[in-house]
Image: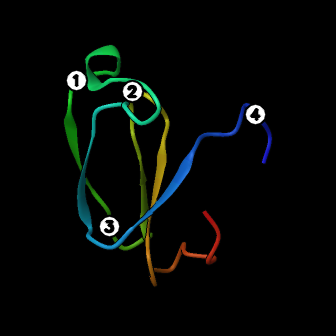
Amino acid sequence: MNSNDPETIRVREPRISCDGSGDIPAALGHPRVWLQIDEKGYVDCGYCDRHFVLVGGPADNGKG
């Protein structure tokens, strides 16, 4: 993984929220948005480019 690649997060639910936090406090992230994973098995956050992959879905390669 390159340092410019978006962070990939494997999730167990197809509806998830993202606020850009993680290693930083939520107040320094972005507005919370709700994202829905569709038949592709993944969704990307439009704010922070995090890549959310549904565990066991078509896009899940077991890494993340």
N-terminal of the pair, mark 4 or mark 3, is 4
Residue topped by disc 3: 38
Mark 4–mark 1 distance (CA, rounded to whole Å) = 24 Å
Estimate how packed mark 1 is, as few (under 14), some (14 to 19) or many (20 or more) residues with alpha carbons within 10 Å. few
x and y, in percent, of residue 58 in the image: 51, 80
Mark 4–mark 3 distance (CA, rounded to whole Å) = 27 Å
Estimate how packed mark 2 is, as few (under 14), some (14 to 19) or many (20 or more) residues with alpha carbons within 10 Å. some
Mark 4–mark 2 distance (CA, rounded to whole Å) = 18 Å
N-terminal of the pair, mark 4 or mark 1, is 4
Q: Amino acid at mark 2?
A: Tyr
Q: Which one is in front in this view, the residue at disc 2 or the one at disc 3? A: 2
Label 1 close to label 2 by CB (< 8 Å): yes
Q: Amino acid at mark 3?
A: Asp
State the residue at coordinates (34%, 21%). Answer: 29
Q: Amino acid at mark 4?
A: Ser
Is residue 46 depicted above or below 27 in this figure? Answer: below
Q: Which mark is residue 22?
A: none
Q: Which one is in front in this view, the residue at disc 4 or the one at disc 3? A: 4
Is residue 43 depicted above or below 25 in this figure? Answer: below
In the picture, residue 5 is in which quadrant? top right
State the residue at coordinates (39%, 27%). Answer: 47
Residue topped by disc 1: 31
Residue topped by disc 2: 47
Question: How was the colour assigned to the protein in this rendering?
Answer: rainbow
Estimate how packed mark 3 is, as few (under 14), some (14 to 19) or many (20 or more) residues with alpha carbons within 10 Å. few
State the residue at coordinates (28%, 32%). Answer: 19
**In terms of secondary structure, where does tag 1 sit?**
loop
Mark 2–mark 3 distance (CA, rounded to whole Å) = 19 Å
x and y, in percent, of residue 64 in the image: 60, 62
x and y, in percent, of residue 56 in the image: 46, 84
